[in-house]
Structures are given as structure tokens and as C-alpha cells.
Image (cartoon, grey):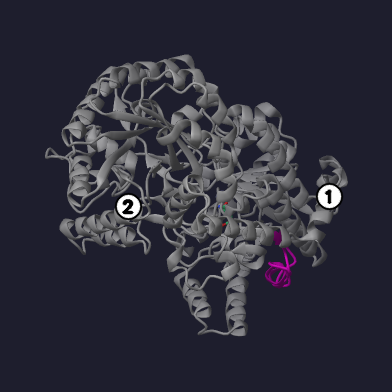
Amino acid sequence: MQLNSLGFPRIGRRRELKFALEKYWRGESSVAELESVARELRRTHWQWQADAGVAQLPVGDFAYYDQVLTLSATLGVIPERHRDGGAVNLDTLFRIARGRAPSGKHAPASEMTKYFNTNYHYLVPELSEDQRFDIAWEQLFEEVTEAQALGHTAKPVLLGPVTFLYLSKTVGSEFDRLTLLPALLECYQAILARFAAQGVEWVQLDEPALALELDDNWQQAFNQAYGVLKSAPLKLLLATYYGTVAHHQSLLSALPVAGIHLDLVTAPEQLQAFVGALAPEQVLSVGVINGRNVWAADLDLVAEQLAPLARDLGDRLWLATSCSLLHTPVDLEVETALAPELKSLLAFARQKLTELQELKALLEAPETENAKAVVARCRDRRAARAQGRNQQLSARIDALSATDYNRNHEFEVRRQAQQARFKLPLLPTTTIGSFPQTAAIRNLRSRWRKGELDDAVYTEQLQQVTRDTIERQLKLGIDVLVHGEAERNDMVEYFGEQLDGVGFTKHGWVQSYGSRCVKPPLIYADVTRPKAMTVDWAEYAQSLTDRPVKGMLTGPVTILHWSFAREDISREQIATQLALAIRDEVVALERAGIGIIQIDEPAFREGLPLKRSDWAHYLDWAVAAFKLSAAGVRDETQIHTHMCYSEFNDTIAAIAAMDADVITIETSRSRMELLNAFEDFDYPNEIGPGVYDIHSPNIPTVEAMVSLIEKAAQKIPVRQLWVNPDCGLKTRNWEEVEPALKNMVDATRELRRRLG
Ligand code: GLN
Ligand code: ZN
């Protein structure tokens, strides 16, 4: 039975690639130095996989920036503006990715967007109507040679042709991307022929687009593509992941490929449909070790499920990670400070390979001491988990009823109570929460974390920042103030650190894009809130002024999406636990006299499943979690939420069902166009469409904002409108923020005058 690794993280267990890249970009190292770090990383990662018993090692999972970009370069898909006449080289890639590189002229970077439903971002290939495809970069072939020179068997891994086209965008004219498929297939054939000439036996072609609902043309494209590629003189493993592909079962089973990979972690139920339809020689790679999470697997249970299949298929069954390990941190071994009870629950990329090896032992030699020890360990872990469940919390959740999810009265009643309490003017002004995180603030926090500042001094200094922030807002004449979030670095981390059941690693970094990594919190047990998390800051800020200061919280759905969440209970259940923790904080804020509370849900949309038909279920529980977090307050307490993206057409009913008194959203770049969704739907509550693009250092003029507010007022009754920036201001500096907000307030006053 072969072990199959679909890909390994490239960033390095100490983020070596990140640092080498950034050094190179700063002009502080040579291409040769960068390449040598990269070579060393590949060597190490291959060795780890080989040590774990993986016979065919993925090649092409490494990328200097992004594997989709590597493929684009290989295929010669280089936007005109990023060429410089010479051959494609690393700087060409960096110009595409970042708009600039140590050599060549600057040009706007290509668009970057999320890779399916992950937090990984890829560079969108740009295809023109007369696009040609020619092998233009040798990196992939060189890496094959490199692996072979180290004594490994190389299994090149690249995105399949249909998904490549699917993820691309057209430039120049509008045309059907599928018209490019024949030319693209010729280039794929050339690539496969090169691999074959290098002595490669298996190539893995990733086609995650199969997890989506595809129209007939795209389905047909798979027949066409693999009908052509079957003539390649090597074996193709068609890999699907991130979701079930059962809806394409007959299509997929009929493709002339030597093997199929299924993600059985996200969709275990699809196995049966495919097993029956396997061709006589075909290999089935079963993705049973989660490539997108950090938890140790229940290997004994997995082995139990796979045992009959292992008997039937023999060596045609490959044991695999569900998808590339790109989405997991690299190595648990470097986490020396982690609490043992948390560490025992974890498996990072390297450990997941060991799990594959252990799983194989469970299937092939279940009677050995080794195998028995693995089973015992899995059982112990489950028992500890069960014991760790918080009975009180379970009872509280069981006792929830509809009233806990709904405010006491409908919006119109609340609106009147809130108007009587706050007496806000027409077009109230506010901001989204954070104010500039200055170097002084960051410095303060890092000294406090290192123990160089004690709590009292740290608090006192941050209070001073808060006081300054409040004074500035008062001087600007803003109506609803914020305390500025100076005490928060990353908002999810801020709440995570104060909640029980949430843990943090030191090196658990995962690549988000290029050299950028994130270190998500680990939700490993039942989540509870041992004590107030924000009340002191809010109370302090409110004590400085008679104007309302918004309490500022991160919502349950966002905390969930931006964390690694346990898998022994459902995401819906975790969201409920988080919602109760936030709800308790909301109620505590209300009790402390905070009249307006914002619960941010910027990641709300990210959780949407790949398949539309699954959306309704997700939206149901996500909306419920938000409502549960918000509904514990009196009518006259005003609940805000904030979401910072610009797609609402397809989810507007759910957004409305959240029943926040006020929602603030990002709209300035779309020139208020995305308000159409709210207009067409007749959105009932109040809304603050952003009028200040905070992603740009530019200071918006009064006229520009007047015109945006006027546009908004054409779509939404002015009585429902608020005026605010697109998002938080923590990445900007005061020199930009102060004049921009002054203009925002002036624009609002101008309109109040005009509108009476
Ligand atoms: N309140 C947060 C802030 O202002 C919201 C951040 C976000 O939407 N991502 O920073
Ligand atoms: Zn935002």
C-alpha cells in the first residue's frame, strides 16, 4: 500500500522561505542565495516525506510565490506588462505577484484571490483571446532532476488544465476561456512528455474545480482534456479535494486516468459511489488525513473503515492526505512551550506523514505492538476529549430556545427606543473600530509581552492612547465614538487569548500568500469566557465623554473561520459556544453602561460552502450564531455589525436576518454600486456604507464623499443611513486619518444642511 503526499508546505518550519524572499526583495541578497535557501527547503521536505515512507515525492508543490503562478510561468502565461523582453525568471514571477522585483520595470501586479474555500491566495492567470501556451520556465523540470539526484522518485504535481482555465480570467476582450483548451492541452502534453523523458512514472493533476457545481461546458471540458492527455506516456493521478465530487461521479469515473484521489475528510460519504465504478487497473487514493487542520487523526477508526477496501484493492489503494498539506503548519516538534494536553491533540504537516505511516501499519499489521500502541493512543485521546467536555455549557446550550436568538422587539420598536436614548442626528457619523496602530503602540505591546513592562504601566500607557483617540474624535465632531482598539494586535488573537478552550502556538504559521503567513488560534476544547474581555477598556473610554462609545467585539462566526477548529464536534456547535461567550460579553458591556455594541463579522462570507446547494444550511447556523451573540440586550441597546467586502447580492436575506440594528460595510471603491443589493431587497434596518477607502493612503475630499453619500441616499432612505469609513483604520497613520475624517464630517454636515 503506497502512501501519497499531495504536497508539503513550502514556507519552512521557521518560515525560512518568507525571510529569504523578503531579504531578496529588499535587495539584501542575491538570486543565488534565495535559490539556495529554496533548494535546502525542498531537500529537507522531501527527506521528511521519504523518512515517513512516502515513496513518490511531490515535486511542484514548492513555489517561490504561488504554485498557480509557477504553472502560469511554465505555460508561458505572462501578462504583457510583466515581460521585459528577456527569458522568464524569478523576477518575472515577482513582478506578476507584487508589481515589482529587484530587476525589471514596475507594473501593476496581477489580481490575487482566495483559492477555493481556503485562506490561501493564488495569482489569477490572465488569458487573452489569442493566448499562446509554450513552455517558458524550466523550474518544474529542474526540480524533478533535483529530486532524482537526491535519490528520490519524483511525482510532479500540478494544477490540471480545466481547473487552470477555471481559475483564470480573460483580459482584453470578453471570450469563452474554454476556446483556449485545445492549445492549452498541447502545452500540457509537451510538459508531460518532458516529465516522461525524465523518467517520471506518475503525475498528479489537481482538479479541485470538480468540487464545484459545473455547467455542461465545463463538465465536457474534462472529457475533452483527459481524452487528449491519456496519450501521455505516463500515469495520471487526478486529484480532487476540498469537497465531495459525488455530483460528478459518472463523469469522473469515466475519465481515462490511472488513478483518482478523493478527499474523504470533507466528504467521507462519497467513497462508496466511486469504489464501485473503479476501472480494473485504476488506483484509488483515499485522502483520510486532514490536510487542512491541525488535529491528530483517529487512526483506529479510519483503519476500521478502510479495512474492507484495503482487502479488495490491495496495492491499488493509496493512503493519502486529503489535500496538499499547504494549509497546515509544518512541524509540531518546534513547539517546545506548548501545554502537553494540547500538544497531544495535534499533528502538523510532518506528523501527518507519520500518521499515514501508522495507518498503513494498522491496516497491514494490526497485531504488532506498534499498531496496538497507536490504537491505545487514539482511544486515550478520545477518552480525554470526552472527559474534557464542559457539562454546564452543554446544559446551557440544550436549554436555548427561540427567545435567546431574538431581540425583545422588532427593529422599529428598538429604533424608537434607541433614537430616544441617543438622539443622534440625521446621517450619524462613526468609524469601524481601530485607529492607527502606531510604532509606539506596537513597541509598548512587545515590551509588555516580553515582561519588560508590568500590567499596570502597560494599561496606564494604553489608557493614555485611548484618551488621545477619544479627544481626537471629539474634536473631529464624530457622533458615535470608538475606543480605538490600541490593546489589540490581531482581533481574533485578542479574543482567543482570553477564552478558555482556545490555544496558541509559537510557530504554527500557514502561508496565506507569497511571504505572508498567518498563525490561527486553535479551538481545541469547549469554549468558555472566564472573565470580561473588553469591559474595562470600553468603560474607561466611555468615562471620558458624554457621546456614546461603541463597545467593540469580534463575532463568533469570524473567530471560528479564522481559527483551526476541533473536529470532534460540528462547526455549528463551536459557533454556538463562541456565540454564548460573546453574548456574555455583550451583556456585560450593556451592564457597564455601554449603549452601542459592534460585533464584527468580516469573515461571515468566507464560510460559504463551495456548492450553492449547501449555502442555506451554513447561512442558517451562521446567522443563528450571530443572533445568539447579539440578542441578550434591551431594546435601547444598539447592536452594530461590520463586514468588509463587497458581495451581498446572493446573501442579502441572511444579512437582513441577522437583525443588527446597524450594519457597516465596504462600498467606497464600488462607488456604492453594491448598495443595489440592499436597495432591491428593501433592507429594513440601518446601514453605513463606507465612504472612505481605507486601503489607500489617499485622503478623500469633501466633494467625493458628498457625492458618495448622495448616491447612497438615492438607493437607501436617508433616515436609514450612517456615514463611516470602509473598515478599521489601524493600518493607516494619523496624518492621513485625521484630515480624511474631518472631510467625512464636513461632507456629512453639508448633506444634513441640504437634506434638512
Ligand atoms: N473593528 C475592526 C477594526 O476596525 C474590524 C476589522 C475588520 O473588519 N477586519 O479593525
Ligand atoms: Zn472591515
Considering the image in quadrants, where does the C terminus appear?
top right
Label 2: element kind: helix
Return the residue nearer the eye: 591 or 76: 76
Question: Which region is colored magenta?
Answer: 526-551
Does 117 sit above or below residue 460?
above
Q: Residue at x 58, y 46 (%)?
A: 603
What number is the disc on residue 50?
2
Task: Name the foreground residue: 148 vs 72.
Answer: 148
Q: What amino acid is found at the position of numbered circle 1 in the picture?
A: Asp
Q: Residues within 10 Å of mark 2 (few under 14, many from 20)?
A: some
Say which quarter of the image contains residue 714. top right
Work out whether 742 lies above or below 245.
below
Q: Residue 343 appears at what percent x and percent y? A: 54, 65
Q: Which residue is the site of mark 1?
A: 398
* Above-or-below relation of 602 to 386: above
Where's the N terminus, which quadrant? top left
